Image (cartoon, rainbow, N blue to C red):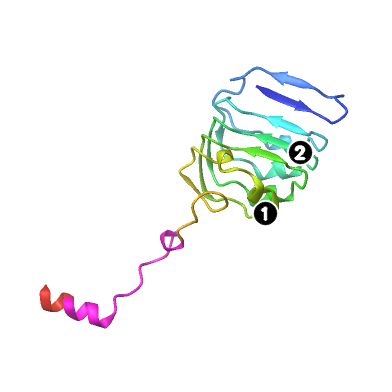
C-alpha cells in the first residue's frame, strides 16, 4: 500500500498494493517536499531508487521493502535529516550502505534480503573485490616455490 501524508493530515492518500506492478519509482516524487511518509512496499516496483527522493526534505518514513529494486542506495538520501525509519528489505540492492547518521541508526532488518549490500549494520564491504582491483603480486619466495614444484 502507498500511504502518504503531511504532518497536518491535509494531504492523505492511499493507493492499493500492486498499483505500480513492474514500474519504477517516479523521479517526480522528489518534488513532494512536504511529504512525511512514503510507503511503497509490496508493489513489485522495478528499477533503482532515484536520487530525487532526497528532495523530499520533510520525509520521516521511507518504506521500500519487498519490491524488485536494484542498484545502490543513493548517498543523496543522507540529506534527509528527518528520516527516522527506513526499510529497503527484500529487494536486489547492492553496494555500500550510505554512511550517514540516519543510516547507521537503522536496524539490520531494514536491509535484509539484499545479499549485495555491505557496510553499515551489514557485513563490511570487501575492498579487494571492488571492480578494477587486482590481487596483490606474489612475493618472490612464493614464486620461486611454485617454479620448483611446478
Compared with 36, 16 (above or below) is above
Give the residue number, with chain letter if any, for mark 1: 100
Q: Residues within 10 Å of mark 1 (few under 14, many from 20)?
A: some
- The answer to which quarter of the image holds residue 27 is top right
- Residues 46 and 96: in front is 96
Q: Is residue 92 above or below residue 76?
A: above
Image position, residue 55 (x, y; %): 76, 43
Q: Residue at x 70, y 43 (%)?
A: 52
Give percent across and percent down for residue 134: 38, 67
Q: Residue at x 88, y 28 (%)?
A: 8
Magenta stretch: give its range.
127-145
In front: 88, or 130? 88
- In primary-sequence order, the first of circles 1 and 2 is 2
Q: For marks 1 and 2, give the CA distance.
A: 16 Å
Helix, strand or loop status at disc 1: loop
Q: Are marks 1 and 2 in contact (CB under 8 Å)?
A: no
Quadrant in which the N terminus appears: top right
Q: Which residue is labeled 2 in the image?
A: 59
Residue 79 coordinates in the image, percent (x, y) = 74, 50
- Total number of numbered discs in the rendering: 2
Say which residue appears at 42% left-offset and 65% top-offset. Answer: 133
Name which residue lies at 58% across and 25% down.
43
**Does the segment drawn in magenta span residue 141?**
yes
Please say whether residue 22 is one of the residues in the magenta stretch.
Answer: no
Quarter of the rendering occupied by the C terminus: bottom left
Local secondary structure at mark 2: loop
In the drawing, what numbered circle is on residue 49?
A: none
Residue 90, image x and y in percent?
A: 51, 34
Does 125 sit above or below residue 7? Answer: below
Q: Residues within 10 Å of mark 2 (few under 14, many from 20)?
A: many
Image side of residue 137 versus residue 98, left or right: left
- Side of 124 relative to 9 (left or right): left
Amino acid at each position: 500500500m502507498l500511504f502518504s501524508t503531511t504532518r497536518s493530515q491535509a494531504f492523505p492518500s492511499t493507493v492499493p498494493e500492486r498499483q505500480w506492478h513492474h514500474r519504477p519509482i517516479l523521479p517526480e516524487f522528489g518534488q513532494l517536499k512536504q511529504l512525511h511518509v512514503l510507503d511503497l512496499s509490496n508493489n513489485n516496483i522495478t528499477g533503482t531508487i532515484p536520487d530525487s527522493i532526497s528532495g523530499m526534505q520533510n520525509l520521516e518514513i521511507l518504506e521500500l521493502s519487498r519490491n524488485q529494486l536494484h542498484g545502490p542506495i543513493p548517498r543523496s538520501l543522507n540529506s534527509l535529516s528527518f528520516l527516522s525509519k527506513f526499510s529497503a528489505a527484500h529487494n536486489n540492492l547492492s553496494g555500500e550502505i550510505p554512511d550517514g547518521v540516519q543510516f547507521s541508526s537503522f536496524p539490520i532488518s531494514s536491509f535484509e534480503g539484499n545479499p549485495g549490500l555491505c557496510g553499515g549494520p551489514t557485513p563490511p564491504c570487501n575492498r579487494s573485490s571492488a571492480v578494477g582491483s587486482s590481487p596483490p603480486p606474489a612475493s618472490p619466495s612464493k614464486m620461486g616455490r611454485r617454479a620448483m614444484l611446478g
